[in-house]
């Protein structure tokens, strides 16, 4: 009886939040650098 089938599988919502956050930060930094 092994109940360790969860090898760190984040929820789609978490992935979306992290992805959008990283993209936003990258875009913001790029815009500031260009200005």
Image (cartoon, rainbow, N blue to C red):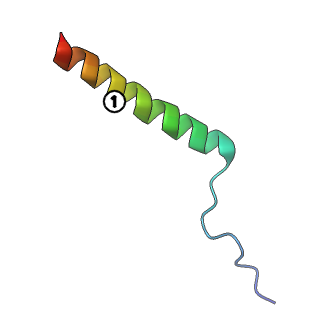
Q: Seen from this angle, which residue lies furthest right?
A: 1
Q: Which residue bears the numbered disc 1?
A: 26
On screen, residue 2 versus residue 13, left or right, reads right
Point 72% across, 75% down: residue: 5
Point 62% across, 54% down: residue: 10
Q: Nearer the viewer, residue 7 or 1?
A: 7
What kind of element bears circle 1?
helix
- Is the residue 9 above or below the residue 21 in the image? below
Q: Quadrant of the C terminus?
A: top left
Snapshot quadrant of residue 4? bottom right
- Is the residue 10 above or below the residue 26 in the image? below
Point 76% across, 86% down: residue: 2
- Is the residue 7 above or below the residue 32 in the image? below
Q: Position of residue 18 (x, y in %)?
A: 50, 39
Q: Seen from this angle, which residue lies furthest front?
A: 34
Q: Quadrant of the N terminus?
A: bottom right
Q: Nearer the viewer, residue 2 or 21?
A: 21
Q: Nearer the viewer, residue 20 or 6?
A: 20
On screen, residue 30 versus residue 13, left or right, reads left
Q: Position of residue 8 (x, y in %)?
A: 60, 64
Q: Position of residue 27 (x, y in %)?
A: 35, 23
On screen, residue 30 versus residue 20, left or right, reads left
On screen, residue 12 versus residue 20, left or right, reads right
Q: Position of residue 7 (x, y in %)?
A: 62, 70
Say few, some or many: other residues with alpha carbon within 10 Å of mark 1 (under 14 / 14 to 19 / 20 or more): few
């Amino acid at each position: 009886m092994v109940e360790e089938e969860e090898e760190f599988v984040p929820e789609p919502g978490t992935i979306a939040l992290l992805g959008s956050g990283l993209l936003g930060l990258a875009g913001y930094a790029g815009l500031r650098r260009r200005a």
